Image (cartoon, rainbow, N blue to C red):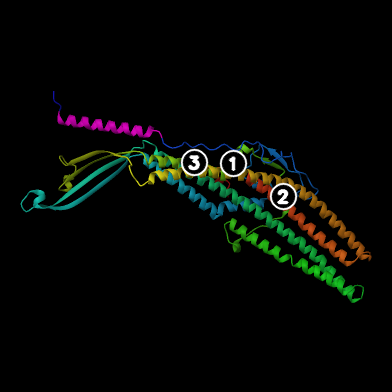
Amino acid sequence: MSSHPSDLKAAVLRGRAHALTVLIGLSVAGCAVGPDYHRPDAPPVNRYTAQPLPAATVSAKAADGDAQRFMQGRDIPALWWTTFDNAELTRRVDTALSHSPSIASAQAALRQAQESANATRGGLFPSADAAAGATREKESAIQSFVPGGLGPFTVYNASVSVGYTLDLFGGVRRGIEAQLAQADYQRAQLDTTYLTLAANVVTASLQEASLREQLRATEDILDIQRKSLRIAEQQQQIGAKSLSDTLAVRTQLAATEATLPPLRAQLAATRNQLATYLGTTPAQLELSPLTLDAISLPQDIPVSLPSSLVEQRPDIRAASAQLHAASAGVGVATAAMLPQITLSGSAGSQALSAGDLFSAGTGAWSLGLGLTQPLFHGGELLHKKRAAKAGLDKAVADWQQTVLVAFQNVADSLQALQYDAQGLAAQAVAESAASQQLELTRQQYQVGATSYINLLDAQRSYQQSRIALIQARAARLSDTAALYAALGGGWRSDTQIASQKP
């Protein structure tokens, strides 16, 4: 029994459609060549420093002299700068996170990477295009076998074409994987920007407060020295003191005054830097006064486990994302050396008038199957694969180096806090002794029991110890902020960051 031609044609079309479905299924379910991503293991250690941490630092009888307790296994709070318990400091950080162009740039880079990853996903699906057009033609007698030729005439056409390249070896999927890893990298870079900016604002604010207090201490010393100079000049006039005594006082006064311009220059530069951090110009900067006395030293210091550091530090997460992208890149380069199967099809209509399009007898269709196997590209594909493998080796080494630097940062910060506490305790003793020595020398000088040179030396020692004590207090606060940053500053999501903005 013979089949009707239309039935035969339908059967052929169904067979081709079934074959297309099978090939697409194989493409989706096929394996992806190249290595699967595995992040290297963190260093197998249970502490950051060579020696175990003490339970707490030493304490000192001075401002910011409380002992700091190390809370092992605790995570850093996301808004870690609030632990300094200063509203102005918190306002500055919040302003920076809301207005800094560096944040806007990192956010835009993340959106760009995400959209690029979304665009790459299109390679998993068939492409479809619609086309329509009209062509004016005239055929020669040779072409048409009609004396004098055929035409001129117009051909109208409309069609839809579909193309699909099967991802049998996972080259497209590895490409998507690489793009998603790049998005992860940009997300980690955004977290790095948040963390770095917050740490910079806190450190610069502490530096500003320290410089202000150093200036105030220097000006107090200058007031004393100016009074001493007036007394020395009066005593010289009545012959009680020599000119050399007066010159010694004047020299010491000038030397102290010479320390003011550098301090003022540092303060101006720090304020200008703060303006940049806060997303404004120095001329527009508005800051409320900030003093060291108004900033609380955090006493309970969380110390995350070493195994958690690779999850918290955004720079390590960025290195992990780059390693992931490099791993996927090897798969992309490998797949490019293997066969590619392309399916194509089109359906449409051709007619001599636009009104006849899609009418009976004007239909046209085609189905195609193509196979491409790279044979010779001058070594291009092989060397690209080798380059991708070298890139993977580099990414592994970069990840390891980033982790080592991170552990070094934490160790440095932890040890700095211990030594800062010891230094503050010693400096507090030195400042107290210098103050007592100055008062005793002043009393001796008033009764003529010591020379004016000794009094000047006592004043100079007290000035130096007082400024050193201010610097020791600021260092302890700054190194606490540095430890928070070294530990990753508390992991946070984009939603958490957005919710904290004023």
Look at the image and give the residue range highlighted in magenta.
4-31
Q: Which residue is mark 2?
A: 476
Which quadrant of the view contains residue 328?
top left
Residue 77 horizontal/vertical position (percent): 63, 42
Q: Residues within 10 Å of mark 3 (few under 14, many from 20)?
A: many
Question: Looking at the picture, which amino acid does disc 1 mark?
Answer: Gln
* The magenta stretch spans residue 111: no
* The magenta stretch spans residue 27: yes
Residue 311 horizontal/vertical position (percent): 57, 39
Q: Which residue is mark 3?
A: 324
Q: Is residue 15 above or below residue 83?
A: above
Instruction: Please name which of the two marks, 3 or 1, marks the residue nearer to the observer.
Output: 3
Q: How many marks on residues?
A: 3
Name which residue lies at 75% across and 47% down: 421
Q: Which residue is mark 1?
A: 312
Question: Looking at the picture, which amino acid does disc 3 mark?
Answer: His
Q: Which of disc 1 and disc 3 is earlier in sequence?
A: 1
Work out whether residue 87 or residue 45 is closer to the camera in this orientation and state it.
45
Residue 107 horizontal/vertical position (percent): 51, 49
Label 2, secondary structure: give it: helix
User: Is 452 placed left or right of 495 in the picture?
Assistant: right
